[in-house]
Amino acid sequence: MSAHLLGMVVEGPDDARTVPGLVDRVLEGAVPALKGKLGQARSYCGIDANAPLVMWSAVHQCRVPRRHGHFGGKPALEDARTAVLALRAFVARDPQPEAVVLVRDSDGKETERRQGLEQARQDCAWPFEVLLGVAHPMRECWVLAGFVAEGKREEASLAALRQELGFDPTARSHELDASSKTAKKSPKRVLDHLTGGEGEARCWTEPDLGHLRQRGKGNGLAAFLDEVEARLVPIFSHAVIGENAGAELGPPEPSAQARDDTGGRVPGRS
């Protein structure tokens, strides 16, 4: 099974664990043949040869032409030009990825950033699929959507947070506030309080996708999972179908000339 190369632009190293983990969940759920084979089926890349990702803060360093002017007659919105710059850099990359994943924290600008990324996606006919994700207000909210309390300590911690905040932060993570790491409604503070800074991966690997979609309606997670299903799953599905078809066909039959040269017998058969 050949590996599909997927470009990734994210906020930082933590996203480089969460985003691929979520992508893998959707791929395995939609294409059962990938179970246990994802490490061979896909790999992530940044713009540099050996980098597994590129951070939004570093995109401006890309040595490709900048995007100027309007988008479809409208002014550029949040991140539109930066996203185009990243996509142009992936176009120039060798080898070129088959898809590029752009995931951004909203930082309170959910609509503007989503529309800006959409402007970039529609700017031209890119030679790869472009997937968009906006974590509202930030990545930690996607993790919180998958948190399920285990044991009395975690149940007590979640109950204390519900009382403090006035709502369940795992069910309504989009109501948290990313303005300050130490604020009462900080997603980082809430997640750390629940997990102790460890074991985050269980939040996106253990709950079923229906749970993640339900709790991710307001924070952008459900929309991102839909992007993966609509734009990335077909790439892997078609590849698996092609490989299975090749296996069923078996080795090619010898030509008529080869059969004639062996008295009508197939080489290697008695």
Image (cartoon, grey):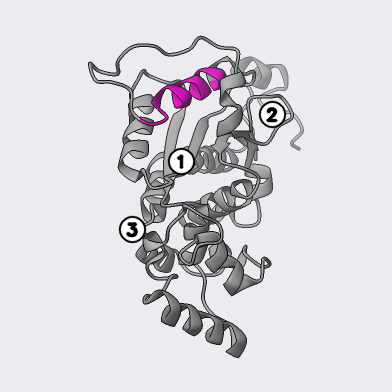
Which corner quadrant holds the N terminus? top right
Q: Position of residue 123 (x, y in %)?
A: 35, 20
Q: Which mark is residue 218?
A: 3
Q: Position of residue 174 (x, y in %)?
A: 38, 60
Q: Which mark is residue 52?
A: none
Q: Position of residue 54 (x, y in %)?
A: 62, 32
Residue drawn 66% across the image and 25% down it: 264
Residue bearing the label numbered 2: 265
Q: Amino acid at mark 1?
A: Leu
Q: Magenta stretch?
A: 78-90
Residue drawn 50% across the image and 65% down it: 144
Residue bearing the label numbered 1: 232
CA–CA distance in space, label 1 to label 3? 22 Å
The reply, left or right, for residue 57 in relation to residue 39 is: left
Mark nearer the viewer, 1 or 3: 3
Q: Amino acid at mark 2?
A: Arg
